[in-house]
Image (spheres, grey):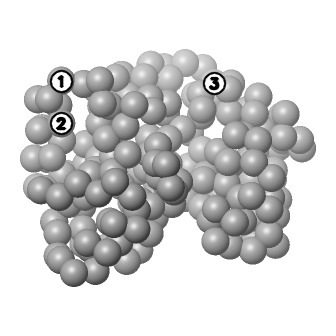
Amino acid sequence: VKSCSATTDLWGFLSKRSVDMVIVDLRLTDAVGLQVLRRLKTNYPNMKVLVLSSVRDTFNIQGVLALGGDGYVFKEEPLSCLLEAIHNVLLGERYVPQAYLKELAKKETDKGFFMPKAMSPQELVVFGMICDGQTTKEIASVLSISPYTVNNHRKSIILKTGCKTVIELFKYAVIYDLL
C-alpha cells in the first residue's frame, strides 16, 4: 500500500510499478479529481480505480462512472463498505453506495426522472465546471484542452439541455440533482 500526497507523486509511482487498483479522492489540492480519473483510465485501462470521497452528489458519482471509474465510496461510510467496495472492484464488479442506488430508485418513480446519459464524459466534466462558475479559459487550462474545444462542449451541452445561459445550466443541474 502506497499513499501519494500529490498527483506528481502518483504519476511517478505508477511509471515505476504495476498496480491493480488506485483509490483516489475527487477533492485534490493539485488537480481536478475527475481529470485524474480520466488520465488513469486512459493511461492504465486495466487498472481499477475506486473513488473514496466526501462528495455525495449524484452528478459526481455519474461523472465517475461515465469516465470509467470502477467504484465510488463515501468517506463517511463504515470501513466495512470500503472493504466491500475494494473486494467487488477487484473482482471486476462496479460498486456504488447504497444511498445512491436508493436515490436512483426514488427518482425512477418520480414523474420527471432524468439522467444526463446523452452527455459524453468530457461534457459532464465541462458541465460541472461551468456550474462551478469557471470560465472557458480556466476550464481549458485545467483540462489541458483548447478554449475552442471547451466552447464546442458548451454548445453541445446547451443543445442537449436546452439551456441558453450559465444560470439556466445551474438551475438545470439543481432541478435534476446533478450538483
Q: Quadrant of residue 113?
A: top right
Q: Earlier in the sequence, mark 3 or mark 2?
A: 2
| 3 vs 2, front mark | 2
Q: Position of residue 18 (x, y in %)?
A: 17, 76
Q: Can see residue 160?
A: no
Element class at badge 1 = loop
Kindly identify the residue that appears in the image at 38 percent across and 45 percent down.
25
Q: Position of residue 128 (x, y in %)?
A: 64, 45
Q: Which mark is residue 78?
A: 1
Which amino acid, by three-letter code, is at mark 2?
Leu
Residue extending farthest to the right is 164
Q: Compared to 3, does 18 lie above or below?
A: below
Residue identifier under label 2: 82
Element class at badge 2 = helix
Kindly identify the residue that appears in the image at 27 percent across and 51 percent down.
23
Residue identifier under label 3: 112
Which amino acid, by three-letter code, is at mark 3?
Gly
Q: Can see residue 126?
A: yes
Q: Earlier in the sequence, mark 3 or mark 1?
A: 1
Circle 2 packing at 10 Å, graded few (<14), some (14-19), many (20+), is many
State which quarter of the image contains the N terminus. Answer: bottom left
Q: Position of residue 168 (x, y in %)?
A: 83, 34
Kindly identify the residue that appears in the image at 33 percent across and 46 percent down.
51
Kindly identify the residue that appears in the image at 44 percent across and 29 percent down.
56
Q: Which mark is residue 109?
A: none
Q: CA distance from mark 3 to mark 1?
A: 33 Å
Q: Name the side, left or right, on which 94 lies relative to 137.
A: left
Cβ atoms at labels 2 and 1 below 8 Å apart? yes
Circle 3 packing at 10 Å, graded few (<14), some (14-19), many (20+), is few
